[in-house]
């Protein structure tokens, strides 16, 4: 089944901006991907520094999605979306860099939706959602979306 931005927007009730082509198929990626101020990293890539806590509380991701992060100054939300019973999410994580928002595990394609950036899909697996940071000389700051 082909998932489009329009069908994902309808499923979640989250409107996307008019400049985005809503009939295009959402790309599905099995590796690193970024969306504004978030970065999605396959868990095995950062497993030495990020891991769910023992006994972490996991939440099933409902069809309407889970808001992961809202942009700076109350902006647009980044939302994790998945079919029922295919994806779970936890914020109970240890991250030596202090950038992780959480970890999700999915047995089917899961999507990251943003009204301004559109959507991307993640193949089955385990992923870390982190804030992105940028360097300016010797200083680092979080990317503000």
Image (cartoon, rainbow, N blue to C red):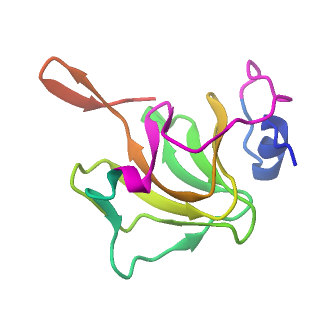
Taking depth in this image into account, of 107 and 90 the one nearest to the observer is 107
Taking depth in this image into account, of 91 and 96 the one nearest to the observer is 96
Q: Residue furthest bottom?
A: 55
Residue pictured at 82% horizontal, 28% vertical = 24
* 74 drawn magenta: no
Residue pictured at 78% horizontal, 36% vertical = 5
The x, y position of residue 80, in whole percent, is 61, 52
The x, y position of residue 61, in whole percent, is 63, 64
Q: Is residue 21 visible?
A: yes
The answer to which image quadrant residue 4 occupies is top right
The x, y position of residue 111, in whole percent, is 66, 48
Q: On the picture, is 3 further left or further right than 16?
A: right
Q: On the picture, is 21 further left or further right than 27?
A: right
Give the residues in magenta: 17-45
Taking depth in this image into account, of 1 and 69 the one nearest to the observer is 1
Residue pictured at 20% horizontal, 29% vertical = 140
């Amino acid at each position: 089944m082909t998932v489009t931005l329009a069908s994902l927007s309808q499923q979640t009730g989250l409107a996307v901006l008019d400049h985005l082509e809503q009939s295009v198929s959402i790309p599905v990626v099995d590796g690193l991907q970024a969306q504004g101020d978030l970065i999605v990293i396959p868990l095995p890539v950062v497993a030495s520094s990020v891991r769910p806590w023992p006994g972490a509380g996991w939440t099933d991701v409902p069809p309407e999605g889970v808001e992961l992060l809202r942009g700076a100054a109350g902006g647009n939300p980044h939302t994790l979306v998945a079919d029922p019973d295919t994806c779970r999410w936890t914020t109970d994580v240890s991250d030596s860099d202090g950038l992780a928002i959480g970890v999700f595990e999915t047995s089917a394609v899961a999507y990251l939706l943003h009204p301004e950036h559109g959507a991307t899909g993640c193949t089955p697996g385990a992923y870390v959602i982190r804030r992105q940071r940028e360097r300016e000389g010797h200083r680092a700051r979080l990317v503000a979306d």
